[in-house]
Amino acid sequence: MEVNKGKTQIEAVQKDIWAPEYFGDNPDLYNVHEVKRLVHLAPVEKVLNMARAHSIWPLGFGLACCAIEGLMAAQGPRYDLSRFGYEVLRNTARQADVMLVAGTVTTKAADFVVRLWEQMSEPKWCMAIGGCAISGGPFVDSYHVVPGVNKLVPVDVYVPGCPPRPDAVLDAFLMLRAKILDKREYLQRSKGKVVTG
């Protein structure tokens, strides 16, 4: 008798917890398909990458005009990079996980670019913003310009343009997020697609 009373109380509580609009009037918790729908198992690395991809902390330092034209405009109210959760530009490499190289890299500046890269903790990514950071731009023939930041550090995402548009910078952040989450379909669809100014 007492057992049935307890069972009735449990059923009453279950009806309060399990809202009918989500789970129906009589949820079958012992059904394997229901458990699969509610519980997701994943490797720890995948869970960590989900957190990393949605809270990227960029290292904000600009070497030339691309920092103003593309990067700072992307932070402004019109494009609003913060809606994706990437607004925390760090001023120290030790707290950042994405290096944004915006502008011309000279041989004099190359040493501190590499030093900042080495100060960043793993995992870390790099984004080359603008034609000068990608290939030296119009100054590529100069003796004091590094022909692309990929000669110094590995680059994950390239943002073309001189200067790149702010929406191209936004697109680059979304591509980096897809790369961290290992979304190959998204990257395949974005292949060859370029947003330039």
Image: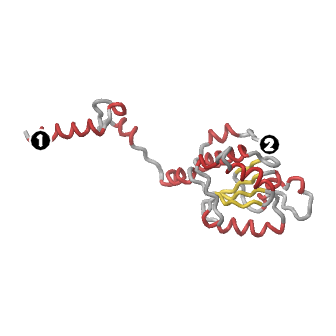
Q: CA distance from mark 1 to mark 2?
A: 72 Å
Nearest the eye: 53 or 34: 53
Q: Give the residue type at disc 2.
A: Gly
Which label lies toward us, 1 or 2? 2
Q: How many marks?
A: 2
**Residue under the image location 23 percent in, 40 percent down:** 13
* Image location of residue 179, percent across then percent down: 63, 48
Q: Give the residue type at disc 1.
A: Val
Task: Identify the element where label 2 is drawn.
Answer: loop
- What residue does disc 1 label? 3
Question: Image check: 8 left or right of 124?
Answer: left
From what the image shows, is residue 121 above or below residue 140? Answer: below
Q: Quadrant of the C terminus?
A: top right
* Image location of residue 72, percent across then percent down: 72, 53
Disc ID at residue 197: 2
* Image location of residue 100, percent across then percent down: 71, 57
Question: Image check: 66 left or right of 95?
Answer: right
**Residue under the image location 51 percent in, 54 percent down:** 48
Nearest the eye: 50 or 182: 50
Instruction: State the image quarter where residue 140 is shown.
Output: bottom right
Q: Residues within 10 Å of mark 1 (few under 14, many from 20)?
A: few
Q: How is the image coloured?
A: secondary structure
**Residue under the image location 20 percent in, 40 percent down:** 10
Q: Residues within 10 Å of mark 2 (few under 14, many from 20)?
A: few
Question: Image check: 20 left or right of 148?
Answer: left
Instruction: State the image quarter where residue 139 is shown.
Output: bottom right
Disc ID at residue 53: none
Instruction: State the image quarter where residue 62 is shown.
Output: bottom right
Which label's residue is closer to the chain start, 1 or 2?
Answer: 1
